[in-house]
Image: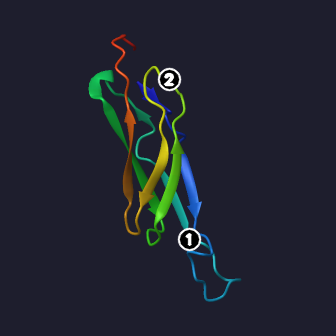
């Protein structure tokens, strides 16, 4: 079972270098919220890799780049999965992406 391999939500607001407001006082950066499509994943250890779906809500007109790092929940790094660190890129108008996590098959039964 893999649970809480990653923290649940990310938030992103556009920077002034990405947004050209007509009046700086009136301009608000667009909100983009990124989260996992599922809060809990269960996989067999012999699957090799699991793809975790990341979804974007809110403004879709800007590209988004999200940094991620795996962290332990019920699954333990080095025992159940390989540590993952990287970036997820979502071009403008894309609403989903995937993070792959390599699963370690240690042949030990776990419930």
Residue lying furthest right in this view?
25
Q: Position of residue 99 (x, y in %)?
A: 40, 44
Question: How many discs appear?
Answer: 2
Residue 50: horizontal and vertical position, in percent? 34, 35
Instruction: Give percent across and percent down for residue 72.
Output: 54, 28
Please tell me which residue is depicted at 44% across the width and 53% down the height of the picture. Answer: 88
Residue at the outermost bottom position: 22
Of tags 1 and 2, which is closer to the observer? 2
> Helix, strand or loop at disc 1?
loop
Pick whichever of labels 1 and 2 is earlier in the sequence. Answer: 1
- If the image is split into quadrants, where does the C terminus sit? top left
Which color scheme did the rendering employ for the protein? rainbow
Q: Which residue is mark 2?
A: 76
82 or 42, which lies in front?
Answer: 82
Label 2: which secondary element: loop
Residue at left offset 57%, top offset 60%? 12
Image position of 71 with respect to 104: above or below: below
Residue 50 versus residue 77 in the image, above or below: below
Are circles 1 and 2 on residues that touch, CB within 8 Å? no
For the residue carrying disc 1, how many other residues have a C-alpha within 10 Å: few (<14), some (14-19), or many (20+)?
some
In the picture of the structure, the residue carrying the numbered disc 1 is: 30
23 vs 98, nearest the viewer: 98
Q: Residue at x 48, y 51 (%)?
A: 87
State the mark number for residue 86.
none
């Amino acid at each position: 079972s893999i649970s809480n391999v990653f923290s649940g939500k990310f938030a992103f607001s556009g920077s002034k270098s990405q947004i050209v407001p007509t009046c700086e006082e009136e301009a608000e950066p667009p909100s983009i919220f990124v989260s996992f499509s599922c809060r809990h994943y269960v996989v067999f250890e012999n699957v090799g890799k699991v793809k975790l779906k990341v979804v974007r809500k809110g403004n879709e007109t800007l590209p988004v780049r999200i940094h991620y790092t795996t962290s332990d929940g019920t699954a333990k790094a080095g025992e159940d999965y390989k540590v993952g660190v990287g970036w997820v890129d979502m071009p403008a108008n894309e609403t989903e992406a995937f993070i792959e996590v390599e699963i370690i098959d240690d042949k030990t039964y776990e419930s």
